[in-house]
Image (tube, rainbow, N blue to C red):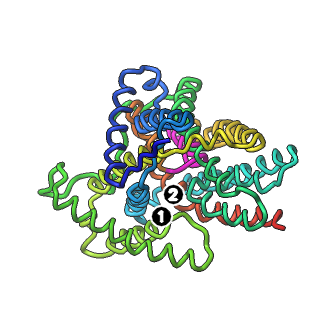
Amino acid sequence: MLIVKLNAVQTLALAIVVYFIGTTIRRRVPLLMRFSIPAPIVGGLLFAGMSTILRLNGVVGFEFDEALQKAFMIMFFTTIGMGASAALLKKGGGPLLLFFGLACVLAILQNVIGIVLAKTMGVNPLYGILAGAVSLMGGVGTGGAFGPEFESWGLMGGTVSAIACATFGMAAAGLLCGPFGETIIRKYRIRTPGRKPHQPKLREALPEGETADISADSLMRNLAFILAAMAVGAVLSGYFQKKGITLPAYIGAMIVAVLIRNGMNLTTLRDKIEDRTVELISETSLALYITMAIDGMKLWELVNLALPLIVILIGQIVLMVFFCWLCVFLVMGRDYEAMMLSVGMIGFGMGATSNALINMNTLSQKHGPAPRAFLIVPLVGAFFIDFANALIIITMSSWFKP
């Protein structure tokens, strides 16, 4: 079989082409528009499906350089940290804490469901945790981190299983978020804002003399802040790793970005970080990361998932739908914001915060802004829950450690 290896630049170029293919298909297929399936999901899954068929038939296989994919992922989460000022955190208030609490409960339930189903089928309960909060709430990064740890405890194929389950979760969430949101809107006849998508701002008006256009100087300056946070954050993440603390690779950069933003807010440099420019960088890096991540999905690995893992993952989908419907949506207010928070929970609870936000953005483009949801989901899904989830995984897996 011919193996085509794409370098970093070729991988990026392919991602851009696939993104616009997804955009074109989405415009021409009403069903995709109706259920608010994002363009990166449409184009990415199409390419991943085609490449999987070609590989399984021994025609050609594609291998991608993931250097830029990881860089765009860290850049996206760094922009989330750059926007997390004390003013915004205070604005989140009680709903933020409540949503965080629900996310923690979901992570625990994912492990409980996984453990129960694993024991029912007579397999090691650690597989249940692996197909629970490790690969779903945690995603590919957490799965890749805890997989070798579980293997050291005697669990065969822990890393491969974790990554395959995370791949399944990300694909399932990408296809589930939009239809779930649209169904909730119709079922409860939710009144939607019906305006342009939300763009969070710290300032109500532009400073005197500043135009709505983003200048090259502004782009370079804000990109410099983001890249500096990424560089220092890499050192911080390395420190965590040396201390045996298992966290996603972007956490260090997010922490540094939060410190930079809030530190500058205390000085005369507070206006040097421009939210409109950071949002542009955030949206661009998110779209590229999601498209590249889905392009590179190894869907053929899902074919090799053992029956117990498939059963557990199906159980996780059922849990996710009912939890986000009966708990998140109802508890958070039964309104448009609550629907968007539920969609966000599905996105990062079965894959990644980036997956959640791109689906939320697609819904907001159609139905209007959800300011509270766009504030809460990134902070909880990309920051707070990662620390809590690591503790939950470590605690519950220790019950079955040999």
Which tag is nearer the camera, tag 2 or tag 1? 1
- Residue 254, position in %: x, y? 45, 66
Can the viewer see residue 84?
Answer: no
12 relative position to 160: left or right: left
Q: Which mark is residue 327?
A: none
Which range is magenta?
335-353
In the depicted structure, whether residue 181 falls above or below residue 14: above
What is the chief secondary structure element of the magenta stretch?
helix
Disc 2 vs disc 1: Cβ atoms closer than 8 Å? yes
Looking at this rendering, what residue extends furthest in the left direction? 209
N-terminal label among 2 and 1: 1
Can the viewer see residue 125?
Answer: yes
Q: Secondary structure at mark 1?
A: loop
Identify residue type, mark 2.
Ala
Nearest to the observer: residue 373 or residue 60: 60
Residue at position x 70%, y 61% in the image: 393
Residue at position x 63%, y 41% in the image: 302
Which residue is disc 2 drawn over?
382
The span from disc 2 to disc 1 (Cα, nearest Å) is 9 Å
In the depicted structure, whether residue 109 falls above or below residue 178: below
Nearest to the observer: residue 388 or residue 87: 388
In the depicted structure, whether residue 25 falls above or below residue 356: above
Identify residue type, mark 1.
Tyr
Residue at position x 36%, y 25% in the image: 27
Question: In which quadrant is the C terminus drawn?
Answer: bottom right
Which residue is disc 1 drawn over?
250
Q: Secondary structure at mark 2?
A: helix
- Residue 182, position in %: x, y? 52, 28
